[in-house]
Amino acid sequence: MQITPNGQEPIVSPRIDPAEATGKKNILGYDRDDLKAALLEAGVPEKQVKMRTSQVWHWLYHRGVTDFDAMTNVSKDVRALLKEHFLITRPEVVEAQYSNDGTRKYLIRFADGNEAETVYIPEDDRGTLCISSQVGCTLNCKFCHTGTMRLVRNLTAGEIVAQLMVARDDLGEWENPTEGRRVTNIVMMGMGEPLYNFDNVKKALEIVMDEEGIQLSKRRITLSTSGVVPHMERCGQEIGVNLAVSLHAVRDDVRSDIMPINKKYGLAEVLQACADYPGAHNARRITFEYTMLKDINDSDADAKELVRLIRKYKLPAKVNLIPFNPWPGSDYECSDWDRIQRFSDIVYEGGISAPVRTPRGRDIMAACGQLKSASEKKSRAERDREEAAAKAATADGAHVDAADSALGWV
Ligand code: SAH
Ligand code: SF4
């Protein structure tokens, strides 16, 4: 971060979306129907709209262009119309950090100044991008860094897709779109609860899965939820991606203590929703995420109960054991390595796969549960100063709080 000559950090005030300031709209984030309607409204002749939509879609999402003039098979007249009405803008990458294990973390600032983090995790046989769905989170799970932030707002479909676009820019992936992919998988496991932003997440994933665009198969996309029961079935039916569920405890008292959402949707309801998840079967198992918290959820009895529950509900499931990743001020400790190993063995002996997830990117605070916007890490005084400046600059400081209360789900 740059420091001003008087030694203070510069005040980050919300930027006006460049698209809005020019009266032009950002074309990224439209689904096909939106794009068709937008082209028609911009004056593209009706007879051409279908073809032009396909062409523009291809350039935007298959080739990743950021300039209408690069769309060489689109006629000059139509390109002129596009330039008159639209922009192709990516959000700003304020900081890109590279871990020594190859993990990359991007701090992305959206047009209104809000920020979210996106993490790229390369492995031998795949490259996974961990995408955020909200700025902050309403749910306050006690072991999660994001949970210490309040919910600022939902991300739009465009902002969710844009996280993939900027990662692909950084990885130089557009040049060779079908071979040598760097991002082969997506996990909706960044900041926020994706099922509390269902419509935008759905639209974003539809754009990402489109066969004439980015072409990621639904089998390569996993959505993680803390157990928002009413939307789990919709997720399977309407989006069709793999489901991961943050379980983290096998008794309601423990789960309610560490994950307050359990008071609303308890274990039995969550497990029943997993049993009913459309498309779950042995070849397409549900993943249970289980963060190993020392002396909280890591006993032999917990492991045995986990096996019993998975059997009771006849779940085609595997368990991902996540060593707890500490963050400044966290109250928990990670279970000892022997304990994690023993827990894993018991679950394996029960016939259920239970690998331990190797923590990635811990040195840059990019591992599970460590994400938090840099702006939120600042002191209260700094934030007050910024908020005052932002309000004065835009006279629009109210929308964040309004969004917060409108979304007070739990
Ligand atoms: N909100 C969704 C998506 C976030 S996914 C959800 O909760 O499922 C991130 C995963 O990391 C979740 O399983 C979450 O519970 C887990 N997690 C959160 N904080 C963690 C921490 N400090 N260490 C390890 N895992 C953590
Ligand atoms: Fe939100 Fe998931 Fe963190 Fe819980 S674990 S606070 S649901 S991001």
Image (cartoon, rainbow, N blue to C red):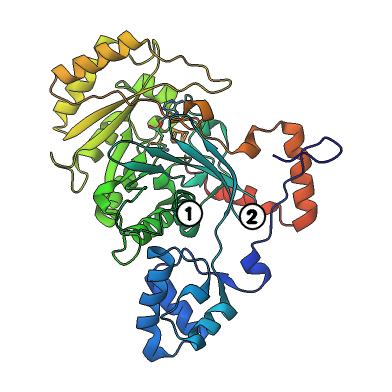
Mark 2 CB lies closer than 8 A to ligand 2: no
Could you tell whether 278 is left or right of 166 in the image? left
The kind of residue on which mark 2 rests is Asp
**Residue 179 spot, x, y in % from top left:** 29, 55
Q: Is residue 199 above or below residue 258?
A: below
> Which quadrant of the view contains residue 150?
top right
Split into 4 quadrants, where in the image is the N terminus?
A: top right
62 on left or right of 7: left
- Check residue 169 in the rendering and tell me which mark sits there, or answer none: 1
Residue 380 in the image, given as x and y percentages of width and height: 72, 32
Q: Is residue 271 left or right of residue 90?
A: left
The correct choice, above or below, for 294 with respect to 55 in the image is above
Picture residue at 32% right of the left edge, 51% below the top: 180
| Residue 177 appearing in the image | yes
Q: Amino acid at mark 1?
A: Asp
User: Sequence-wise, which precedes: disc 1 or disc 2?
Assistant: 2
- Per the image, label 1 sits on a secondary structure element best described as helix
Q: Is residue 272 visible?
A: no
Front residue of 216/114: it is 216
Report the image quarter containing ligand 2. top left
Instruction: Left or right? Give the position of 308 relative to 400.
Output: left
The response on whether ligand 1 sits within 8 Å of label 1 is no
Query: Marks 1 and 2, how far apart in space?
Result: 22 Å
Tell me the mark number nearer the camera, choosing from 1 and 2. 1
Number of other residues with Cα within 10 Å of mark 2, as a class: few under 14, some 14 to 19, many 20 or more: few
Q: Nearer the viewer, residue 335 or 296?
A: 335
Q: Nearer the viewer, residue 23 or 137?
A: 23
Is residue 79 placed above or below 167 in the rendered structure? below
Q: Position of residue 70 (x, y in %)?
A: 48, 73
Task: Name the residue located 50 percent from the left edge and 55 percent from the top edge.
Answer: 159
Q: Residue at x 46, y 47 (%)?
A: 133
| Residue 3 horizontal/vertical position (percent) | 77, 38
